[in-house]
Image (cartoon, helix red, strand yellow):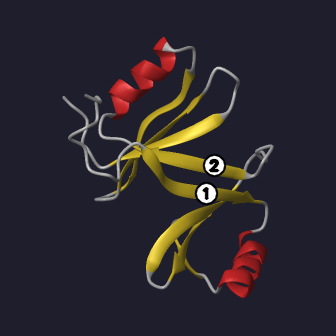
Amino acid sequence: MSEHAEQPDTLDVYGWVEIGTSDLDASERFYSAVFGWEFTPFGDDYRVAMSRGRQVGGFYRWADPLPDGVRVYVTVADMEGTLERVMANGGMASTSRTEIGPDRGWWADFRDPLGTLVGLTTTTPPVV
C-alpha cells in the first residue's frame, strides 16, 4: 500500500506555479491579453493570477532570473518529512518552512540532486 494511499488527491501533485519577471506590469498586460487573466497584488513584488475566479498561479519580481523562468510547487501534507526525504535522497533544502501569509499556509523549496529548484506548499501547521 502506498505511503499516501489515505491522502486526498490534492497532495503530492503540482499545486501552484510561479513565473518570474523583471516587469510585473508588462507581464500582467501580456497574460491578461493572452489568457484573460486578472491579477491581484500580494505585497509589492508579487501578483496572483486569476482565471474565472480561481487562482492559477503567481508572478514575482525576480532578484536573479531563473534559467527557465518558471517555478512549480508540489502540495504536501508533511513539509518537514518531505524535506528530510529530499536530503536523504541527495537533494538540498534551499528554503525551510516559510509562512505565505495569515491563513494561507506555508512554502519551502529544495534543489534536486541535479540542481533543479522545486517548491513545496502545505496548509498543515508545523508539528511543535
Q: Quadrant of the C terminus?
A: top left
Whether residue 77 is situated above or below residue 15 in the rendered picture: above
Numbered mark located on residue 71 in the image:
2
Q: Amino acid at mark 1?
A: Glu
Point 30% across, 34% down: residue:
78
* Total numbered circles: 2
In this rendering, the answer to whether 94 lies above or below 61 is above
Give residue 29's quadrant in the image. Answer: bottom right
Contact, mark 2 vs mark 1 (Cβ under 8 Å): yes
Give 61 or 122, whichever is nearer the viewer: 122
Identify which residue is drawn at 44% across, 76% down: 54
Q: Is residue 47 above or below residue 108?
A: below
Task: Name the residue carrying label 1.
Answer: 18
Residue 124 image offset from top left, x and y in percent: 26, 44
Where is residue 22? Give x, y as percent. Answer: 79, 61
Q: Secondary structure at mark 2?
A: strand
Horizontal side of residue 31 vs 79, given as left or right? right
Q: Which badge, 2 or 1, comes first in the chain's sequence?
A: 1
